[in-house]
Amino acid sequence: MQMHSLAFDISHTLAGGLVLISFMMLYQDRLYSLLNVFALHAVVLALSVAWQAYIQDAPHLYITAVIALVFKAIVIPVALHRIVKQLGIHRDIESAVSIGLTMLAGMALVALSMVLMLRVTADADPLAREDLAFALSVVLLGLLVMVTRRNAVSQVVGFMSLENGLVLAATGAKGMPLVVEISVAFSILIAFIVIGIFLFRIRERFDSVDVSALDDYRGERR
Amino acid sequence: MTMASLDPVAAVLLIPIVSAALLAVLPGYRLTARLNVVASLLTFVSALSLFVIERPQPGPYVLVDDLNIVFIVLNTFVGFTTSIFSASYIAHELETGRLTPVYLRFYHAMYQTMMFGMNLAFVSNNIGLMWVAVEIATLTTVLMVGIYRTHAALEAAWKYFILGSVGIAFALFGTILVYMAARPIVGEGQDGMIWTLLIQHAAAFDPALLNVAFIFLFLGYGTKVGLAPLHAWLPDAHAEGPTPISAVLSGLLLNVALYALLRFKILLAANPDAIAPGPLMVTMGLVSLIFAAFMLYRRRDIKRLFAYSSIEHMGIIVFAFGMGGPLANFAGLLHMVMHSLTKSAIFYAVGHISQIKGTQRINRIRGLTVTHPALGWGFVVGVVAIAGLPPLGIFMSEFLIVSSTFARQPLLAIALVFGLLLAFGALTLRLTSVAFGEPRGSTASAEASYVPMLAHIALVLCAGIYLPTPLVVWFQHVARLLG
């Protein structure tokens, strides 16, 4: 019982740490520091996944942990660092909304996911339950990063942190099949996108992910 | 599960993926365009053979049932005709230098990979695998939308990627939640993701968890269906990519997401305590229909016009499936097939038109029926069909949807008819200016094959006049499955 509650505490701490680091991402105003925080996010994810692999006795999850560590904590941040340098966009990030408002929205999202997930999973075992609540928080915070940033690189960082939340959820769901395959599929997706940013030099900020942007271009605004 | 019975399923998946690898390395337009057509034809033939062979037992990964056969056959058929259209379209793009040979190889390889992804999504019996397959199909279309590398194309591809990924992330979260709901009943591991097992035990699942899961799945896959207000990627992706891709996006990829949604709807319906997915789908469907119908009036770009029309029709289809019941489901299914055929035919026509005129601006295209009779009249019939006029197939399915709604929810039917009339007005307005009047723009003749377009239109016309009894029986059976 003692051992069990220790296992619970550690995975709880790691998952909570992910939420905290997601919050840290919200207020980074430079691309380099955003990338560093993301690398930290990936390291904590790798630890969390490895811990789940250990307590669930599921060795295949170590693969996911290694992918998170090598690919997301090292390869991608380094590659993005170089891209940022080459594109010459290591200035401030313009976020669409002020930091204070973003943080408030972040808190609201975390509260929402706690209320939602803890209520509906009342019967599930507590470990999976809280893991899922934390994971949804990370997903929603990643979404918030994507919405408030307009730079292509920081949108990708937001997407990757969102995806970290999904991996957290998938590993927390005990015995879920295809977790490794899904994390590989995500890595491929991200690699494609990073290569895309590099090849096509997506440096200009697309002002919004809103349909009106191309309406202007196509002369469809009145 | 004998090997012989597995073969067509394997062929539907293997032919596209093998030819994708071949097309990535083979040089030359003539050879690759033909190979693309042949591969698509072979895939279609193997899909057809699913009708006659003994079906494989549902395994952990593969499932063939009456529902997905309809989708697979439609998918591979439109994939085949689009490959013919694509051959003549791409030849022109090579001439004008918009595509280089390297990108052509990439294009063909991606085309077949996309077919692979879509077919895999249809045959998968595993909700995790289905998710991966939808992701593959999405990724390949993102890459193809951006293939012209103009500023607008890259922006469209980027927007598609961002919104598509968010959608796909929500869908994965929903999938995980379904697994969580299934785990206490079905057991840990693989079994908790096998759809046929899930459906057997769905009644015992925790309803609260299933409800939340469905909300995420609905938002996730609904983004890919193009339901308003999650549709923002769709018009741009249609307008900026190559036209064959617009045709498969509208005709096929939206159906893939819809299929995923239907699978989960059936799952939810099997649990008596879970929320009914119907009202949610009806609302989103109506919102999409009416929103898109209004948006149709403001379009200046011909491909964006028909992209909004796709949102409108997906809205109608989701509405019909949301209403449920044998008649509405039958009508929804029929409407989906008719929309795929008609919309891809229209995009074939639009592809030739924009190549001849060198523009997609509606006000620079006039008098098509005078200068290009075959193309112009084909386009006219296509638009008349999509606007829902008799005697074409879409009229029949829309009539069935409206009449079945009137019998049950007259108020909803009024909103539905309002949306339909609105869209009809917008389309006829645009049609008259494009097809008739003083010719404007280039009058050069097109070196193109109109066979795919005419074949689709002929099918839609036939379906409008007479539906073969076996087809009706089949659709009725599937409609009952959908509950």
Image (cartoon, rainbow, N blue to C red):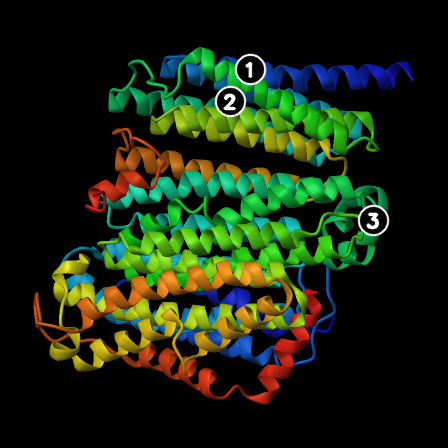
Is B228 rendered above or below residue B263? above
Q: Quadrant of residue B34?
A: bottom left
Q: Residue at x 73, y 18 (%)?
A: A12
Left or right: residue B167 compared with residue B211: left
Q: Identify the chain of the residue marked 1, using the numbered disc in the image.
A: A
Closest to the observer, B328 or A104: B328
Q: Identify the chain of the residue marked 3, using the numbered disc in the image.
A: B
Disc 1 marks which amino acid?
Answer: Ile
Closest to the observer, B38 or B306: B306
- Point out the frontmost of discs 1 and 2: 1
SS under mark 2: helix
Residue at the spot of label 1: A21
Disc 3 marks which amino acid?
Answer: Val
Indicate the quadrant containing the C terminus of chain B: top left, top right, bottom left or bottom right: bottom right
Q: CA distance from mark 2 to mark 3?
A: 36 Å
Left or right: residue B293 compared with residue A158: left
Q: Residue at x 44, y 40 (%)?
A: B163
Residue at the spot of label 3: B186
Sequence-first disc among 1 and 2: 1
Q: Quadrant of residue B262?
A: bottom right
Residue at the spot of label 2: A73
Q: Residues within 10 Å of mark 2 (few under 14, many from 20)?
A: many
Q: Position of residue B440 (x, y in %)?
A: 8, 67
Q: Residue at x 69, y 58 (%)?
A: B266
Indicate the quadrant containing the N terminus of chain B: top left, top right, bottom left or bottom right: bottom right
